[in-house]
């Protein structure tokens, strides 16, 4: 994996995170209101020291269902305190005793009925509260960097956890493209890692050139909070205004078969950034897997980014991110942050 450049200059701090699970809190932001009727029990659960799949298995056992009867919108880390929704399919609308779920790991905050299974990605985003401890760095400079991020946004990197322990998912994807058989769930994970690696390489080149949040000739634009794209089209004052208001963002490729949508300078940069031998293998593998060309915003602006110093060397950050965006992208722009739990920050 390539080292990711910094958009705003040299690192400003060193710190530790996840000294305790409470130092990494994530609350899922719901995308819809429950219908109050139907055969899917919608549970809002706060978990501590347990990953999402583990809790889903607990729910399946509690309800006497196969694991496929329990659904969730997004994955949340084990070494954290997180709140998220699960749906449990109970066609007879008879729920076991919810109090029986209570443990040191699991607390049910809310339960109601809904008329549809909870789908992956059915969330509006995630709200984070991160506490950095043993911070080494000048507080004033860190304050200024965070104010700059709040005003300008930051590069929308795919986080380290997308690439697995020691970045092993990309080599595994290359092996899969070379003929190694994988389970369907592994295959999906490795295809995502391959796409993400190529996207990060394009974004790294744009950060290096200083145009990750400014237009290039042939730019494809993505609407904020949406997967909708448009362009290329001539640069106008209207586009400049929309870019300044964070209504639109420059985008980069999520590789697949079909024509690259960008053109001109943007296309030349994208293709040049992923023309090394490994990238060509990843591109060919993704095309062979029949994934279609898609796009992802190059720029991210954390919503309601705030910070405060709890002690001279303890910094609290709070912000919200859209689905599929990574808290590690925010931490990356500050400096090296040691994950005491040995895992990467959540989406």
Image: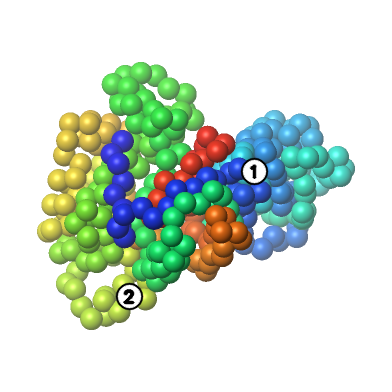
- Along the line of sight, which residue is nearer the eye, 38 or 330? 330
Numbered badge on residue 269: none
Distance between the alpha carbons at the discs numbered 1 and 2? 39 Å
Hey, which quadrant is residue 257 in on the image? top left
Q: Name the residue that disc number 2 marks.
A: 244
Describe residue 25's horizontal placement relative to residue 151 as left or right: right
In this view, 91 is above or below 265? above
Hey, which quadrant is residue 150 in on the image? bottom left
Q: Residue at x 43, y 52 (%)?
A: 13
- Residue 236: image location, x then y, percent: 20, 78
- Along the line of sight, which residue is nearer the eye, 50 or 54? 50
Crowding around mark 1 (Cα neighbors within 10 Å: few <14, some 14 to 19, many 20+) is some
Crowding around mark 2 (Cα neighbors within 10 Å: few <14, some 14 to 19, many 20+) is some
For the residue labelled by badge 2, is the local secondary structure a helix, a strand or a loop? helix
Residue 128 visible in the displayed image: no
Quarter in which the N terminus is drawn: top left
**Discs 1/2, front:** 1
Describe residue 21's horizontal placement relative to residue 263 as left or right: right
Q: Name the residue that disc number 1 marks.
A: 20
- Along the line of sight, which residue is nearer the eye, 184 or 150? 150
- Residue 189: image location, x then y, percent: 44, 34
Mark with earlier residue (1, 2): 1
- Residue 321: image location, x then y, percent: 49, 59
- Residue 238: image location, x then y, percent: 27, 80
- CB-based contact (under 8 Å), mark 1 and mark 2: no
In this view, 127 is above or below 165? below
Residue extending furthest top?
180
Describe residue 339's horizontal placement relative to residue 37 as left or right: left
Q: Residue at x 28, y 21 (%)?
A: 178
Q: Residue at x 61, y 61 (%)?
A: 310
């Amino acid at each position: 994996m390539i080292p990711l450049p910094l958009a705003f200059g040299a690192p400003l701090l060193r710190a530790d995170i996840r000294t305790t699970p409470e130092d990494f809190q994530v609350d899922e932001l719901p995308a819809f209101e429950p219908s109050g009727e139907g055969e899917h029990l919608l549970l809002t659960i706060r978990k501590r020291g347990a990953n999402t799949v583990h809790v889903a298995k607990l729910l399946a056992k509690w309800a006497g269902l196969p694991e496929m009867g329990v659904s969730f919108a997004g994955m949340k880390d084990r070494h954290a305190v997180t709140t998220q929704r699960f749906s449990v399919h109970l066609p007879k609308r008879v729920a076991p005793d919810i109090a029986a779920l209570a443990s040191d790991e699991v607390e049910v905050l809310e339960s109601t009925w809904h008329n549809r299974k909870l789908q992956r990605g059915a969330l509006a985003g995630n709200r984070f509260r991160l506490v950095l401890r043993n911070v080494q760095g000048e507080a004033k400079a860190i304050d200024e960097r965070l104010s700059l991020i709040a005003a300008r946004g930051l590069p929308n990197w795919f986080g380290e956890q997308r690439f697995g322990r020691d970045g092993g998912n990309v080599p595994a994807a290359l092996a899969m493209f070379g003929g190694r058989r994988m389970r369907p769930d592994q295959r999906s994970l490795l295809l995502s890692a391959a796409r993400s690696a190529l996207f990060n390489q394009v974004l790294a080149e744009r950060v290096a050139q200083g145009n990750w949040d400014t237009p290039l000739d042939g730019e494809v634009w993505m609407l904020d909070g949406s997967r909708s794209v448009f362009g290329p089209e001539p640069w106008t004052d209207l586009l400049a205004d929309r870019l300044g208001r964070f209504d639109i963002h420059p985008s980069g490729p999520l590789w697949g078969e079909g024509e690259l949508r960008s053109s001109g300078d943007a296309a030349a940069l994208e293709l040049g950034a992923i023309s090394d031998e490994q990238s060509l293998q990843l591109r060919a593998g993704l095309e062979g897997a029949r994934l279609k060309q898609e796009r992802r915003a190059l720029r991210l602006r954390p919503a309601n980014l705030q910070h405060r110093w709890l002690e001279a060397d303890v910094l609290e950050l709070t912000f919200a991110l859209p689905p599929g965006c990574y808290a590690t992208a925010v931490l990356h722009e500050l400096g090296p942050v040691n994950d005491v739990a040995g895992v990467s920050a959540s989406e």
